Image: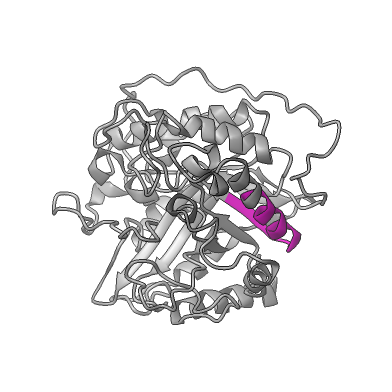
Amino acid sequence: MLVGAYLAVWFSFAPAQALVPAPPTTHAAPPAPPATQVPAPDPVLAPAPAPTHRPAHVPDRKLSISISANHFVDQDGATVRLLGVNRSGTQYACAEGTGFFDGPADNSSIASIRKWGATAVRINGNEDCWLGINGVQAKYSGANYRAAIGDYVNRINAHGMYAIFDLHHSAPGTMLATGQQPMADRDHAPAYWRGVANYFKYNHAVLFDLYNEPYPDSNHDTAAAWACVRDGGACPGVNFTAAGMQELVRAVRATGARNPILIGGPQYAGDLDRWTAYKPADPANQLAASVHIYYNTPANPEWAPCDYLSCWTATMAPLAATTPIVIGEVGEHDCDYDLIYGRGLSPTQPSLLDWADQHGISYLGWSWIANGGSNCAEEPSLISDYSGTPTRFGLGIRSHLLSLRAGAGR
């Protein structure tokens, strides 16, 4: 999701690029042709040396998560889902020179998230801030940024929630990372993930979301777009050398980190129709699929490729039978929840959240940012203040999460 001072331009493209009701072939995944770019050899999982002492930034607690077959399991082997919110801000505040977070990140604000029934928080990363490059102020970058993120993750874990950390804002070369790009860049993304993986590899309550929202090939769902997402290199619609998911998996696993990894597809992580055909190799066998689902307004509800039950049935359900799926972002741009719940659509359909529950799919609302719901067209807001007072949209997410906690429907 594009946030902060940057206008959210999702599927508002020229007619050739705009999303329209999908033709029959959209969800019938054709056989994947050979990629024009040959990936490097499959990654090898380097052994993680046992630390002689626990690194200072690694929490001393039991909480952990891993993938077993088509679901996540905790430290006791019990099935768990990632249910919660995105905490926007850490992808742009540092580059803008305003701090590490947008809004408070103290224990009280984290406790407010937990009170909603959340089991996970997704945190957004900036590669320039993490690496300390391209002119980001020193006080908000490098070791200082890493320490701020690490501390926040530890405190999320201490409140009994998992943390997902992604690569959200990036830029090639000497450009400052102030927004989303069609793909991760080869200049910095592998180094970013080597650094992130090394930092968190002993924290087994952290998951990695390798690239927030790819949209190569001018935001189309094509074989070329999927090949780019996996293999990187020279890609249509990308004016720099892209880093593909395969080389980013390799960067993570070369550190010995076994943390679960989330992999999204093209069209702003909106597509899953060819995920299996184009998934990267992972020697740790710890890959989950990521998809983002947004709705617009009742008058014009469609915002993402998989808004409707027909897509869920054709693409998500079969994939969920073999692979964990995380709806990493779900939102509604009218600050309501009737479209997510299905009753605001014509014809009506089941609630996305209910359907996900029935298929063991995880989901996180976008976003825990207190714009008071006054600008949901730019960024759907779950809260009107950081004590957790929900907007109308947030009320729909909170009520559902609390109903699951009451019924132990995790």
Along the line of sight, the residue nearer the viewer: 71 or 221 = 221
Along the line of sight, the residue nearer the viewer: 302 or 366 = 366
Instruction: Residue at 43%, 37% (x, y): give it.
Output: 134
Horizontal placement of 157 versus 163: left or right?
right
Horizontal placement of 60 versus 239: left or right?
right
Please say which color scheme the image uses.
one colour
Looking at the image, residue 150 lies above or below residue 381: above
Please report the bounds of the magenta region as a residue range: 149-164
Instruction: Residue at 73%, 64% (x, y): give it.
Output: 159
Most common secondary structure along the magenta stretch: helix
Q: Residue furthest left?
A: 15
Looking at the image, residue 345 lies above or below residue 69: below
Residue 88 in view here: yes
**Quarter of the rendering occupied by the N terminus:** bottom left
Instruction: Residue at 82%, 52% (x, y): give it.
Output: 61
Along the line of sight, the residue nearer the viewer: 379 or 321 = 379
